[in-house]
Image (cartoon, rainbow, N blue to C red):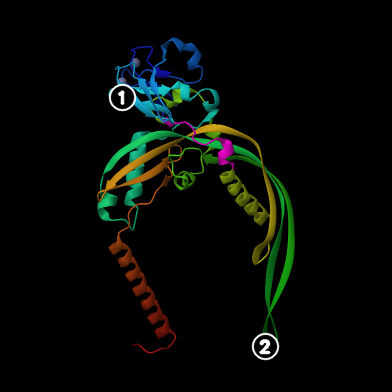
């Protein structure tokens, strides 16, 4: 099933507009709110049953705008027709067990994302000049990435070894007194909305680096939000992703316990025993701009949080620039040492 949103005024394609949070006609400028849109404009929402070919890994859909046949990967749930540019939402990959419950819509437009990327590049101190000042963005794509949001309960206990030192003088002597404490904590925590990206395609470290997302802007899922963007459906179920999120939950438990133990000079976990249980999970789509950049015959991939603009990725490093910085730093340290020696009455040379 292909869904294409047509303008009720002129019949052209409508796409999601990050500035207004609604649908926008690219041809006549007509605007539509998304809340309540589904019911009122159902006749203008064109749905076609047109999966014309399918197998395990791929499926073909026909664009009703231009008639072209599009080949899609098995996890794709929204695309843009590569022939006429018309947004196509693949409804059969967004229904049943694949129906998302929540979405954070894009709040950064493509132009804003491009500008922010160039600004970020200019600030990179250790990257080659041709990279930071160049403009070789090969492609910039807005994609809704599938995430599982877990509600977990973390129960457990931990023993910590804490040390407090106290230095004081008695007569001519300086005395250091070290006290050791055995600290015990028992916790029962509700961990809400712990995210884990559920797409096989997206690198986990890249997606983790985009956090945090602002959940206050999260909406009930509706298909018009996807119009004009790419979207993926999850490739791993919430059960399959649980071990990864449990690892993160353990880290949260540590962090929380640590925050309750204060007033010591050193804190070490002696042992811990946690039990993480899944209460529920929600399937949500989060906005990400993927930036593909050509440099030195290689392609570099960066990801940008489509809501906050936070960027992640590894830019190329310039060895001469790093060497110059290390050289300058060494020189500075050497000069400082000389100055201190001279001030303290040392030899001039
Ligand atoms: Zn229009
Ligand atoms: Zn088309």
- Looking at the image, can residue 204 be seen? yes
The disc, 2 or 1, on the residue closer to the chain's N-terminal end is 1
Where is mark 1, residue-wise? 85
**SS under mark 2:** loop
Secondary structure of the residue carrying numbered label 1: loop
- Disc 1 residue lies near ligand 2 with CB under 8 A: yes
Viewer-proximal residue among 32 and 285:
285
Q: Which residues are magenta?
A: 231-242
Q: Which mark is residue 225?
A: none
Q: Which mark is residue 172?
A: 2
In this picture, residue 13 sits left or right of residue 225: left
Q: Is mark 2 within 8 Å of ligand 2?
A: no
Please determine whether, in this image, residue 27 is positioned above or below residue 301.
above
User: Residue 241 magenta-drawn?
Assistant: yes
Can you see residue 261? no
Circle nearer the viewer, 2 or 1: 1
Q: CA distance from mark 2 to mark 1?
A: 83 Å
Looking at the image, is 268 positioned above or below residue 13? below
- Residue farthest to the top? 43
């Amino acid at each position: 099933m292909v869904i294409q949103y047509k303008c009720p005024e002129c019949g052209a394609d409508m796409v999601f507009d990050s500035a207004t949070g609604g649908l926008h006609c690219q041809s006549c400028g007509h605007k539509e709110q998304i809340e309540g849109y589904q019911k009122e404009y159902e006749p203008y929402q064109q749905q076609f049953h047109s999966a014309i070919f399918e197998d395990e890994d791929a499926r073909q859909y026909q664009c009703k705008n231009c008639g072209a046949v599009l080949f899609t990967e098995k996890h794709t749930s929204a695309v843009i027709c590569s022939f006429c540019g018309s947004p196509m939402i693949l409804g059969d990959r967004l229904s049943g067990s694949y129906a998302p419950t929540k979405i954070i819509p894009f709040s950064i437009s493509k132009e804003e994302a491009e500008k922010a990327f160039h600004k970020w590049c200019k600030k990179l101190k250790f990257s080659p000049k041709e990279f930071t000042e160049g403009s070789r963005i090969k492609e910039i794509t807005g994609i809704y990435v599938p995430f599982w949001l877990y509600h977990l309960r973390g129960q457990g206990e931990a023993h910590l070894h804490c040390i407090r030192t106290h230095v004081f003088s008695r007569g001519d002597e300086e005395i250091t007194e070290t006290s050791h404490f055995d600290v015990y904590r028992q916790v029962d925590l509700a961990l809400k909305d712990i995210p884990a990206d559920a797409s096989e395609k997206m690198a986990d470290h890249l997606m983790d680096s985009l956090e945090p997302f602002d959940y206050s802007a999260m909406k009930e899922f509706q298909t018009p939000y996807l119009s004009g963007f790419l979207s993926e459906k999850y490739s791993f179920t919430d059960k399959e992703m649980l071990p990864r999120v449990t690892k993160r939950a353990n880290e949260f438990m540590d962090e929380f316990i640590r925050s309750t133990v204060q007033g010591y000079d050193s804190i070490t976990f002696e042992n811990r025993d946690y039990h993480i249980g899944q209460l529920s999970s929600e399937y949500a789509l989060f906005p990400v701009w993927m930036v593909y950049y050509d440099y030195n015959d290689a392609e570099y991939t960066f990801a940008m949080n489509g809501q906050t603009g936070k960027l992640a990725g590894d830019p190329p490093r310039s060895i001469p620039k790093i060497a110059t910085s290390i050289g300058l730093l060494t020189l500075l340290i050497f000069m400082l040492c000389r100055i201190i020696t001279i001030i303290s009455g040392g030899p001039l040379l």
